[in-house]
Amino acid sequence: MNYQNSLAFAQEQDANDPLRKWREEFHFPQINGRDAYYFTGNSLGLQPKRTRGWVETEMKKWEEYGVEGHFVPKERPWVKYHESSKESIGRIVGAKPIEVCVMNNLSVNLHLLMVSFYRPTKQRFKIICEAGAFPSDQYMFESQIKFHGLNPEETLIEISPRKGENTLRTEDILASIEEHAEELALVLFGGLQYYTGQVFDMKSITEAGHRAGAFVGFDLAHAVGNVILKLNEWNVDFATWCSYKYLNSGPGNVSGIYVNEKFADDETVPRFAGWWGHNEDERFLMEKGFKPMPGADGWQLSNGNVISTAAHLASLEIFDEVGLDTLRQKSKKLTGFLEFIVNELSGKENIFEIITPADPDQRGCQLSIFFHKNGKQLFDHLVTQGVIGDWREPNVIRIAPVPLYNSFEDVYQFGRLLKEALALYN
Ligand SMILES: Cc1ncc(COP(=O)(O)O)c(C=O)c1O
């Protein structure tokens, strides 16, 4: 695509954007009397206007039915509430309904899935992950490894980019998996690296992990609703994600898990159990002896968090209406526009550099911009001008134009304000 760094170009793109109307479906924070230039959907997605109605519906049920809300309402009785999300979330992650379940929060689900899929033996005990994984994942690895009485330093293999490079090469990931094949128990990667914005080749990683005889899972916090996922087709063993970033379901809202259908009826897979994962036909008999529900539902512990899942359903309805393929097409153009502007401003002086891969298939909507100097001052100036972005130590600004609600004009304005900041602080 031939980009131009001009308001007229941006406005023309917006006028021809088939997804233009969706912006009106979201609440934008107001700064300086206008919509903020909001680029932090990678952290917390904006609130869809329809969400309130979905939450109020459940509040009304609670008001009218009390505990009977579990069984009496014709539409979405709470006892089956989590089932309403299965088809939609399955479409988003490329999974069958039986393979997905919405429950808990992401770090909790990572631990629960580790219980099932990290079963170290004397021979096979190592885990491969990306270096610099999100801190919660790092703490999860460390505590799980110690829980099994092992030493994290001898157990966890963290793959780093080559010297002088910012992102990982697939060939290096695959070579490491092969090298450790004999001792490997688990490969657990981010689907999209939160800091660099790199999308990993989940298909190849899964194939290599399986060739080595290990289980393979992904933390999809930054990938879900952002890039196309085909978990079932790629034969991934398990995955989990959160719903508050690109899935716009609200702060700290419910996570989801995927467990491959090959484990659907496999009661030998160990797990921590709770009553909501027990065979629903016998759940209220309150008897001893855990019999898991088939598929991902069998990993549930507690009864569903209905009020917050209502907000999740509101957002999933939007994804069903828009379609992820259409979103992805716009996303590539919009992020390409941001890349063009940032590179133009960086110029020959190389004031900053984008550490996210240049290949659109190896990234989602986020670009991570590394500032060689004055990063914090530039960022703080942008904040005063109504930009909501994301500063990461030591010198990176993450900017995520989200195709559902960001416009080409938002991106143009970001570039204009960055140019203004450079005039002040460079
Ligand atoms: C990649 C990744 N993993 C895990 C987490 C932790 O999520 P939670 O606080 O929902 O457990 C986050 C949060 O942003 C994340 O980005």
Image (spheres, grey):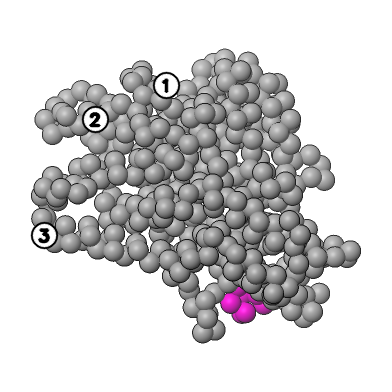
Q: Nearer the viewer, mark 2 or mark 1?
A: 1
Residues drawn in magenta: 379-387
| Image quadrant in which you'd find residue 167 | top right
Task: Decide which of 157, 235 is in the foreground and name it.
Answer: 235
- Majority SS type along the magenta span: helix
Give the quadrant of the C terminus: bottom right
Decide which of tag 3 and tag 2 comes sooner along the chain: 3
Residue that carries the numbered disc 1 in the rendered image: 262
Q: CA distance from mark 1 to mark 3?
A: 42 Å
Q: Say what amino acid the circle numbered 2 marks.
A: His
Q: Secondary structure at mark 2?
A: loop
> Is residue 374 toward the left or the right of residue 301 in the image?
right
> Is residue 27 toward the left or the right of residue 291 in the image?
right
Say if the magenta span includes residue 382.
yes
Q: Secondary structure at mark 3?
A: helix
Q: Secondary structure at mark 1?
A: helix
Q: What label does residue 385 carry, if any?
A: none
Residue that carries the numbered disc 3 in the rendered image: 64
Q: Residue at x 11, y 55 (%)?
A: 66
Residue that carries the numbered disc 2 in the rendered image: 278
Mark 1 Cα-neighbour bin, 10 Å: few <14, some 14–19, many ≥20: few
